[in-house]
Amino acid sequence: MSLAESFFENWCNVIEKRNDEVNQYWCKTKEYTNFIIHAENSVLMDVATLLGLRCYNSDYYYLDSVLYEESDYIKDFLHQCYLTNIRIAFEHENDFKSGLYQEVSHLLLINSELKVVVSYPPSESAEAAELKYLHGIISSSPIADNLSDRQGFLFIMGHVNPYRWVAWVYHKSEWRKLLTNGRNW
């Protein structure tokens, strides 16, 4: 199983387990972002734990969050986070129409095993159009073939009606939809 598949599988497991909290915060932008990323018991912290990784859940060089292995952490600076490697670079964007190209462009410049964007499209047609546009941006990057070969770019889309999560992995010819436990979420 690829890191992208493991991430999405664990994302779905955590979201399912914490579904009451998801519903509580879904329409409250700041509280929801805190719940997903920044709280000490955030969804992302839980996902990191299930992946056997550590999570720095504050901005890290303008990334929303990063996941890393303990051996990646430079222990010389106790009150700051400095890393030698980023396993997963994570961006969360509540506002689907705010310019996801900015998140994608930024992630393309970051050296990490997996790049993840989570957002919330208003419709399937908006999701499809945005993915097509973003595919073109990623395809123009010098690391596009590498991302494709190792499933290195993951989009997770949260839909409100009907409530479901959909994951897409970048492939050089198209986005490929991921399944979790053999099912669509």
Image (cartoon, rainbow, N blue to C red):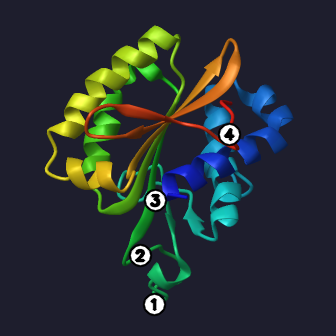
Residue projecting furthest to the front: 182
Tag 1: residue type?
Asp
Q: Residue at x 52, y 10 (%)?
A: 123
Dots 2, 4 in contact, CB < 8 A = no
Instruction: Give the spatial CA distance, label 2 vs label 1.
Output: 9 Å
Q: Earlier in the sequence, mark 3 or mark 4?
A: 3
Identify the residue under disc 2: 82
Q: Residue at x 51, y 18 (%)?
A: 121
Residue 103, percent from left and from top: 34, 38
Identify the residue under disc 1: 76
- Point out the frontmost of discs 3 and 2: 3
Q: Earlier in the sequence, mark 1 or mark 3?
A: 1
Q: Which of the numbered marks, if any, corresponds to residue 182?
A: 4
Residue 179, percent from left and from top: 60, 38
Q: Earlier in the sequence, mark 2 or mark 1?
A: 1
Dots 2, 1 in contact, CB < 8 A = yes
Instruction: Give the spatial CA distance, label 2 vs label 4.
Output: 38 Å
Instruction: Give the spatial CA distance, label 3 vs label 4.
Output: 24 Å
Instruction: Give the spatial CA distance, label 4 vs label 1.
Output: 44 Å
- Point out the frontmost of discs 4 and 1: 4
Identify the residue under disc 3: 88
